[in-house]
Image (cartoon, rainbow, N blue to C red):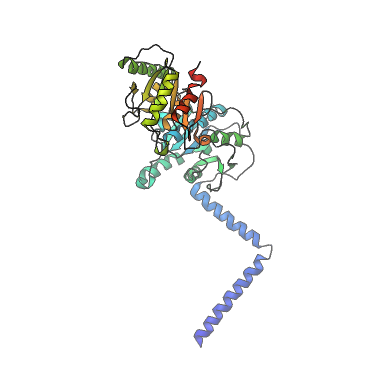
Amino acid sequence: MACLTRLANRYSARRLIAAKLTVLKNTRYYDPINNFRRRVARRLMRTVFGSHGQPTSEPLPAKGMYRILVCHVSHSLGNTLLLTPLLSELEKVYPAAEIDILTRSPIAKTVYGHFFNVQRIFRLPAHGVGHPFEFFGTLRRMRKIRYDLAIDADPLSQTGRLLTLLSNSTYTLGFSSPKKHGEITHAVPLPEHLQSKGQRPVYLLRHAMQRDVTADYPVPDIRLSAGERAQGKTALMRSLAACGITTTGRGIIGIFGNATGDKLLGDAWWTRFMQELEAAHPEHRFVEILPHSGESMLGSRYPAYYSTDLRKLACVLSGLDVYISADCGVMHLACASDVPTMGIFTVTNAAEWGPYGPNRHVVPAAGKQPEEVARTIAAMPELNP
């Protein structure tokens, strides 16, 4: 009997609590309680990720930005190079600022190290779980610096957003999208009309500063010096001379025959392509740029250049008059080396990955024969000065 009484008392107490909660929800006191809970949650987030101020629709200040952090965790060659337009834009709008970069890219120093405003490159291990001490040590060094602005440059990566939130920064900037979570001061809607991997981070900054988003966009740039370009041209001439190719002629066309996955065109495709292109431009000289494996993708039919040093390869590419390849990382390196570039696109989204800017062309090739693609390139103004 006593047991039944205790159960009845517990049931009555629960009903009483539920009734009080129902009454509370229908009173003016409920919203303040929820607001209090939200404030507590925000404070907990700030304890973990740091305080970055409240979201605002005000533009980013044009002055007073001297310490800037760019978070960009993608580590492929193409993605690494396609961040450089943002660095160029930052140097333009904040010329007195120091720029730090937090990245996983193993080539970050080679690509970003020659930007005058870049000060520190914090390189995270490719797999943080496997190298926890290195990962958290790098984050600790980054968090010691107080930044005026931290930028999450990737429109999709949640890791980039979390790293941005971990920074000690007054202002935080990034895209707003369903894949992005975490409160930042300046959230910019993802532009549907602009898909380019190189242009979107620049758009992000311009939109937040309320600058003209339609102005010409900086192109990828590895910042080669005049001396580096001269050395690259000399190395290219040596490669041609070693194969008995005269140093006189209308121009030098570089061909890179490698690509990953479905983008790989194959030796038979390139053989037909080159036969058509050589027939259209017999006055030009051709050189093959070899992939990292060191194996020719064109049947060893042409003089070749090989280097595992990314910057030396960029120097040699800068000595070409025209560069041709399928969509790949070396294509983006050619663009960043300021070479007239013909990017052949068959399966990937050219609006997202295609080269842009003066003397940089997307060549659509899906469903086309190699000869047709060769004729399209042969008619380009860069081959007919």
Rendered position, 15 above or below 219: below
- Residue 135: horizontal and vertical position, in percent? 39, 43
Relative horizontal placement of residue 318, taking residue 198 as reference (left or right): left
Most distant residue in the top direction: 248
Q: List x then y, in percent, for residue 9.
A: 56, 80
- Residue 22 vs residue 372: left or right? right
Residue 307 lies left or right of residue 147; in this view the side is left
Closer-to-camera residue (86/4): 86
State the residue in front, 157 or 92: 157
Q: Position of residue 53 (x, y in %)?
A: 58, 44
Q: Residue furthest bottom?
A: 1
Q: How many numbered marks are there?
A: 0
Tell me if 52 is positioned left or right of 259 in this view: right
Q: In the rendering, at what x and y percent does residue 205 appear? A: 57, 35
Mark yes or no: residue 114 visible. Answer: no
Residue under the point 50% across and 29% down? 363
Q: Is residue 298 visible?
A: yes
